[in-house]
Amino acid sequence: SRILNLAVIPGDGIGQEVVAEGLKVLSAVLPQDVKLETKEFDFGARRYHATGETLTDADLEALKAHDAILLGAIGDPSVPSGVLERGFLLKLRFAFDHHVNLRPSKLLPGVATPLAGQPEIDFVVVREGTEGPYTGNGGTIRKGTEHEVATEVSVNTAFGVERVVRDAFARAQARPRKKLTLVHKNNVLTFAGHLWTNVFNKVAEEYPEVTTDYIHVDAATIYLVTDPGRFDVIVTDNLFGDIITDLAAAVSGGIGVAASGNINPSGDFPSMFEPVHGSAPDIAGQGKADPTATVLSVALLLRHLGHEAEATRIEEAVSADLGERGGKPARSTSEIGDALAVRVAG
Ligand code: IPM
Ligand code: MN
């Protein structure tokens, strides 16, 4: 029998609650011959307060020994802003070379959207995950004075851009509509923008069946609201991808259903799957959090590991569950998890 060796990081706030439901559904969907082995890691605010550590080299070594990582959410108001973001989440994405940050948006039947009508929304954002303004390449001079100058340099390498653009083309090629949109700001960011555009156009020649398109990021925010159906696959840099995927989540059911994967396609390091939402300390421990985004992240995890049928079963279960939800009394976190576990098993 095969083994799925999973590192589990519940993290802070509602992270604990939603990860428990994700694991419940994962156990229910796995075929008999796949044995699930999980190891829990205690990263997050509590560990930081107790030890001052966010993520050590020894932690990275321990995580590395797994097939994949499931993360709930990290972050708490008691920890200064940036400490866990840089010291844990970004450190992990960079250390494990998670250069494909995959964020699908699909408006499922019965799910409320703030957009008029019920538009067809089914696209996936391939956000670059290891470069751009996220590298921490910058500095401050004359700090705290009226003459303070702060820089935050966006790093874009031909290597880093090409590998994520190639990944996006391959994903577009595999989808029925075969359309790929590059989102950037090449009218202003002429250095990085031209690198992205040139690489995009070069790789496009290898994918004659993929229809390509370019949109400035500001215009993209308009189309995501007025005409989201025009998008199939979007490829973009780390910061633009961060921003437009929150908007994408907002128009396609909210962060309660937005899943993501931090993927290292080569398999040299384990990929990490997490809901787009944060730790929501205001509702933590009350059974109010919707575990759906985590459950959908588990589907991405299974697909990444080659369990396509199981991934699809989870997505169909979520779709059916959401379809029946409308007008019913609100269910608790574990009630939703139970319902999904029953559906994927049946
Ligand atoms: C996300 C988050 C992170 C990001 C933060 C917490 C560092 O907003 O996963 O989208 O900006 O990537
Ligand atoms: Mn974000």
Image: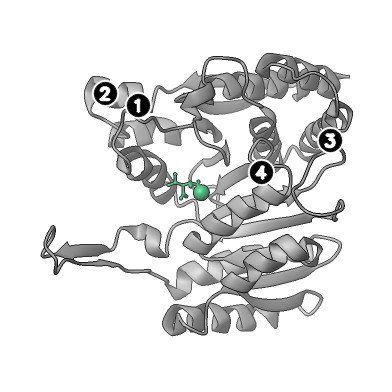
Disc 4 designates what residue?
Answer: 304
State whether residue 262 is above or below residue 27. Answer: below
User: Few, some or many C-alpha atoms within 10 Å of disc 2 (few <14, some 14-19, many ≥20)?
Assistant: few
User: Few, some or many C-alpha atoms within 10 Å of disc 1 (few <14, some 14-19, many ≥20)?
Assistant: many
- Residue drawn at x 46%, y 75% is 158
The residues tagged by marks 1 and 4 sit, at their Cα atoms, a distance apart of 29 Å
Q: Which of 99 and 81 is in front in this view?
A: 81
Disc 3 designates what residue?
Answer: 319
Q: Nearer the viewer, residue 138 or 114?
A: 114
Kindly identify which numbered label has been placed on residue 49.
2
User: Do the numbered discs 4 and 3 sit on residues whose CB atoms are within 8 Å?
Assistant: no
Look at discs 1 and 4 and give the one toward the viewer: 1
Disc 1 designates what residue?
Answer: 45
State whether residue 118 is above or below residue 217. Answer: above
User: Do the numbered discs 2 and 1 sit on residues whose CB atoms are within 8 Å?
Assistant: yes
Residue 184 percent location from the top left of the image = 55, 73
Q: Can residue 32 be seen in this view?
A: no
- Residue drawn at x 57%, y 66% is 236
The residues tagged by marks 3 and 1 sit, at their Cα atoms, a distance apart of 34 Å
Q: What kind of residue is marked 2?
A: His
- Residue drawn at x 65%, y 20% is 21
Sooner in the amino-acid sequence: mark 3 or mark 1: 1
